[in-house]
Amino acid sequence: VLLGQTGIGQPASATDWPLAAIAAVVVGGVPLSGGVGNVGGAVLGTLLLGVVANALNLLGISPYWQPAVTGAVILVAVGFDSYQRKRRELR
């Protein structure tokens, strides 16, 4: 699709898209350890990551930092999920 839009094929194009897709579903509530999610959560995760990427652009932060921020968002989401799971087990 990217090739059709730009008319140019580059091997390094869209290399961070898999990371963004994983981040969107993890932020949307699907645990990395496996489980069930829903479309609404994935859409909300995608919107949140889009807002974060847009904010980074508006703040003038280099685009090279966006994958690092996406990785940090994944770490926070996984940590939050792990915390909630441990809390549920204690009940």
Image: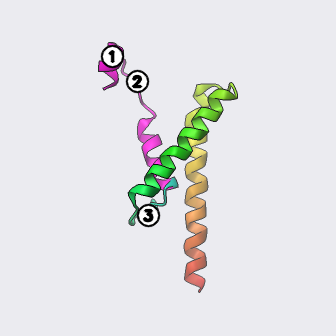
Residue at the location (55% across, 50% down)? 74
Kindly identify which numbered label has been placed on residue 17.
Answer: none
Query: For residue 9, which numbered disc appears in the image?
Result: 1
Location of the C terminus by quadrant is bottom right
> Was residue 52 drawn as part of the magenta stretch in this picture?
no
Q: Position of residue 83 (x, y in %)?
A: 61, 69
Name the N-terminal-most of marks 1 and 3: 1
Dots 2 and 1: beta carbons under 8 Å?
A: yes
Whether residue 65 is visible here, answered yes or no, is yes
Q: Is residue 62 above or below residue 50?
A: above
**Of the pair 10 and 42, the residue shown nearer to us:** 42
Cα separation, mark 1 vs mark 3, equals 35 Å
Q: Which residue is labeled 2 in the image?
A: 13
Tell me where residue 56 appears, x and y as whole percent: 64, 32
Q: Callout 1 environment at 10 Å: few (<14), some (14 to 19), or many (20+)?
A: few
Front-most of residues 86 and 54: 54
Note whether 12 is above or below 39 in the view shown.
above
The residues colored magenta run: 1-26
| Amino acid type of the residue that numbered disc 1 sits on in the rendered structure | Gly
**Residue at x-position 58% and y-position 53%:** 75
In this view, 19 is above or below 86: above
Measured in 3D between alpha carbons, the distance from the residue under mark 2 to the one under mark 3, in whole angstroms, is: 29 Å
**Residue 4: which quarter of the image?**
top left
